[in-house]
Amino acid sequence: MDWTALLRLPSTILLILAAVALLFTLFQLVALRHRLDHGQRLAAAGRAVLLLLAFAITLVLTGLGFSLRGYRLLTEEAPVVDIDARILSPQRWLLVLHWPDGTLRRAEVDGDAWRVEAVVLKWKTPLLPPLYRLDRLSGRYDDPNDEMHAPRTVIDFREAGDVDLLDLHKQYPRWVPDVDVLFGSGVYLPLVDQGHYSVSLMRTGALVARPDEATQQKIAQPF
């Protein structure tokens, strides 16, 4: 786990701020109790207002932190994922996905190629940087007839039960009015045994996939 990369995630930053706000809330609670014990009602009222405000900020930061889980800051060209492929059987592949923060995930897909899709969130306020998250991985067949009738594989990278800022924006647009949603284009490349691929995301929201040199040679000469 790359802790430096983890600390740059927007969800991590927001949850750290939420923890600080929670500590401030607890401090105000102790101060409120102290004022009440000494009969300082006016001072206690002021502490109560600060307590409620700090608690509300804690809830907002926590909610935003969990709703942005999986999102990363989008720079001029952000590395999204590296993919290693190994063939299991004809049109059946084992993929190992390497995220920029060092985490790994294994997935089996059917098809002749892999396809990755990402979601990009842009803000109406230009001062806020765009965010992105990897949305799904799927297999793709070269033959449209196989695409219609052969086994399909789609892997959703969202955890079950996760609250997502995109879903909140769709259901309650007034809650997050500054979100301007852009779906990044999907990208795919042919699968070859022992293939290695890198996927990046441009600031425009376009995905770019690149095989390494050895993989490119296998793609050019598959037989």
Image (tube, grey):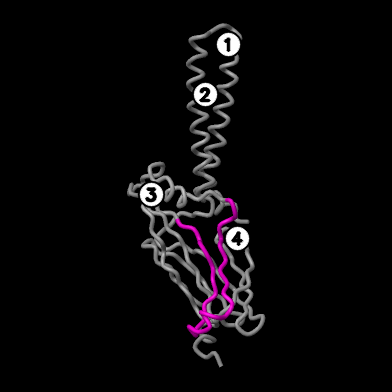
Does the residue at mark 3 contact the one at mark 1 (Cβ under 8 Å)? no
Q: Disc 2 marks which residue? A: 51
Mark 1: few/some/many CA within 10 Å (<14, 14-19, 20+): some
Q: Which residue is mark 4?
A: 102
Which of pointers 3 and 1 lies earlier in the amino acid sequence? 1
Which residue type does callout 3 highlight? Answer: Val
Can see residue 212? no
Identify the magenta region: 132-161
With 70 as the anchor, is 203 left or right in this view? left
Q: Nearer the viewer, mark 2 or mark 4?
A: 2
What type is the residue that disc 1 sits on?
Answer: Leu
Is any part of residue 63 visible from this angle?
A: yes
Which residue lies most toward the top here?
39
- Name the N-terminal-most of marks 2 and 4: 2
Q: Residue under circle 3?
A: 179
Cα separation between marks 2 and 1: 14 Å
Q: Nearer the viewer, residue 21 or 87?
A: 87
Say which residue appears at 49% left-offset and 48% top-offset. 10
The Cα atoms of the two marked residues, 3 and 2, are separated by: 29 Å
Q: Quadrant of the N terminus?
A: bottom right
